[in-house]
Image: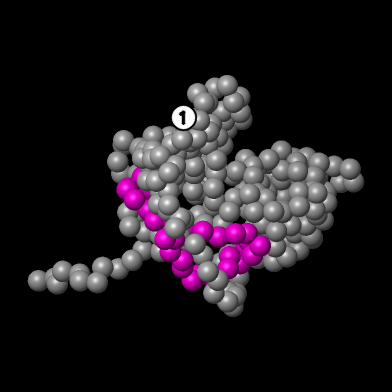
Amino acid sequence: MLDKTYMAATLAQRVQARLDHLNLGPVEAATKGDLERTYIRDIVKPDGKKTVTSRLMPKLAAVLQTTAAYLNGETEDPSLPSEAAPSTRELITVPKVGRVEAGEFREVLEFDDSERDFLLEQADDEFPRARMFALDVVGDSMNRSEPPIPPGAVIICVDFDDTGLPLMDGMIVALERTRNGGLTREWSVKEVVTYDDRNEFQPRSTATRHETIVVYDDPAANDGVEVKVMGIVRRISTPVPRNKPRRR
């Protein structure tokens, strides 16, 4: 897991480095990024704030033309993904731990790991120290996401806790929801939308039956249902049918 003390100590340094690289002043950058005028100045000044909320991290990274992972200290490369060189990492073994199916609660005893499949995948360039896992996608709860996640796809995830990141708007995550004291659980994929008093995990689907999962900051408001973010979806693999009907 990312050392949060390290993140706090490097945030000001990396923000200042990006300002210098872009030849921007902190107030000018904050204005361009639709942030409060003093927001970035308060980060880089001595004894200023050294953390950024999950709601504002995307804006800060965008105006500095870098990634949240760089500002957090997770990577030494400030490049945006489109600028990054192709990965030369060796393939690693990634376990396929089950399936995600929105609205389907199953008894925990049904989750049998005795015949687990494994995939060969490249280590994640942005989170090279994070554990990885794969999940089969059942159902259409995310068939309108960007990019779409259709039924039958396999999603490759990095362990959320290992990234050290806060929840941020637009993240696509694998989610675990348990009830009945942990006896039953649901695994699903959702998109994160953050608010001041809650986090929402929303479907992106052509079907209206799929529900938004709402987690309030006040645990008493969550009706005894526990929700955990398992991982961040990093890649989507969609199989091509072997026998595709011939067009006539």
Foreground residue among 248 and 231 = 231
Q: Quadrant of residue 247?
A: bottom left
Mark 1 falls on what kind of element? helix
Assess whether residue 10 is covered by the magenta stretch. no
Location of mark 1 (residue): 180
Q: Which residues are magenta?
A: 115-144
As drawn, the residue found furthest toward the top would be: 220
- Quarter of the picture containing the C terminus is bottom left
Foreground residue among 89 and 205 = 89
Q: Is residue 170 above or below residue 248?
A: above
Assess whether residue 128 is covered by the magenta stretch. yes
User: What is the tally of numbered marks visible in this picture?
Assistant: 1
Q: Is residue 56 above or below residue 18?
A: above
Q: Residue at x 46, y 68 (%)?
A: 119
> Residue 111 in the image: x percent, y percent?
43, 48
> Residue 188 in the image: x percent, y percent?
43, 45
> Residue 241 in the image: x percent, y percent?
26, 68
Q: Residue at x 50, y 30 (%)?
A: 181
